[in-house]
Image (cartoon, rainbow, N blue to C red):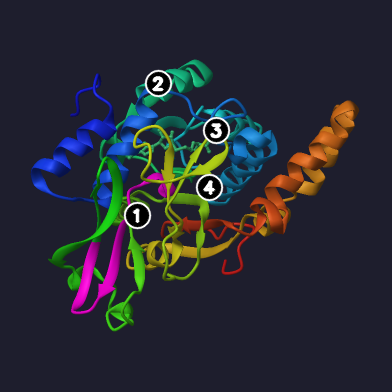
Amino acid sequence: MTDPSMSLAEIFRRLIRTNGPISLSRFMGESNARYYAGKDPIGAGGDFVTAPEISQMFGELIGLWLADMWIKAGRPDPVLYVELGPGRGTLARDVLRSAKRYGLVPAVHLVEGSPALREIQQATLGNITFHDDLTGVPTHAPMLLVANEFFDALPVRQLVRAAHGWRERMVGLDGEKFAFVAGDQPMDAAVPRDWRKASQGTLIETCPGAAAVMQEIAGRLAAQGGAALLIDYGHTELRGGSTLQAVQGHRKVDPLAMPGQADLTAHVDFETLARIARSHDVRWMGTVPQGRWLTALGIDMRAEALARMAPDYAVRLQQDKNRLIADDQMGLLFKVMGLAGPGWPGGSGFDHT
Ligand code: SAH
């Protein structure tokens, strides 16, 4: 644990001066732990806005999807609702309200690292159980798992093809400022096979933390049954290049400039996550753009129904819907990956069901 009275930038500077450069993955992991621990960064007054904070329709349609899966699976009881990185608890609230209309009332287990956000989630949701990670979540019942913008916050490793092989991208110091430097340890073993022979200068990102969480989810779906929706921005095939970014006050800022004070994220590599899921006895339904998935689930009809109930908000509802599904907004960049345990049905909105 780091000393909370000292700025993280100061801690990193001391560490680097004493021991040399630190890995980007460590820089990002400790930055985000500090960033989320003390505050609620989500919403208009914070640093960034997420889909559930844009519109209740997002969580309602996810609740509908989960309830549909559960009904087709024969309404198993007990059943768990598990959410990773629930933010303000808004998504869980909308999911659970919508699921309840179909008779689905699961036990709620939240995986949340931030004490500040736990407090808000508790106030919003009431009877819930918190976990630091998935390992403590019960194993006796099927699990309906949702993660929205969770994987993008997990620390990435950046690997660069140098003259004589692959090296890790590290963070060192240029005077007082943090700067990228190449590590001196060979990292070829950490590079996916297809990429090992890439040309000099190629950079790829891997996320060992995401791979570990995916292993755990897939193992549980195979053993406990259930279904999972992973929603995040990212790509369906691993690509070269850095996607690391930092956001503060709704603006992009230098990712190395203010550790612990800006949200650091990277695109999610859905190709690797899907490969891990498929190496277990798990049905991979597909990874589809968020806009297409929400449209297939009936977001247009839901927006019209809400507009009939609240005509004053009709224009606003259209705008919010547009933010979630339009190609130039969240519709294309964000992807939805669907998974289910053996014997569980295919879910709506995916191509491969
Ligand atoms: N899903 C929410 C919040 C996204 S922000 C929404 O859509 O609004 C990322 C969330 O993941 C926050 O709740 C943050 O505290 C949590 N988080 C980030 N890294 C984590 C980690 N390593 N372990 C547990 N929770 C983490």
Q: How far apart are labels 4 and 1 at the CA level?
A: 26 Å
Residue topped by disc 2: 116
Q: How far apart are labels 1 and 3 at the CA level?
A: 31 Å
**Residue 155, image x and y in percent?**
32, 49
SS of the residue under disc 2: helix
Q: Nearer the viewer, residue 260 or 150?
A: 260
The amino acid type of the residue labelled 1 equals: Met
Q: Nearer the viewer, mark 1 or mark 3?
A: 3
* 238 left or right, relative to 27: right
Stretch of the chain drawn in magenta: 151-168
Residue topped by disc 1: 214
The amino acid type of the residue labelled 2 equals: Ala
The amino acid type of the residue labelled 4 equals: Gly
**Does 125 appear in magenta?**
no
Q: Residue furthest front?
A: 175
Residue topped by disc 3: 249
Q: Residues within 10 Å of mark 3 (few under 14, many from 20)?
A: some
**Residue 228, image x and y in percent?**
47, 50
Q: How far apart are labels 2 and 3 at the CA level?
A: 18 Å
Identify the mark nearer the N-term, 1 or 3.
1
Marks 2/4 in contact by CB < 8 Å: the verdict is: no
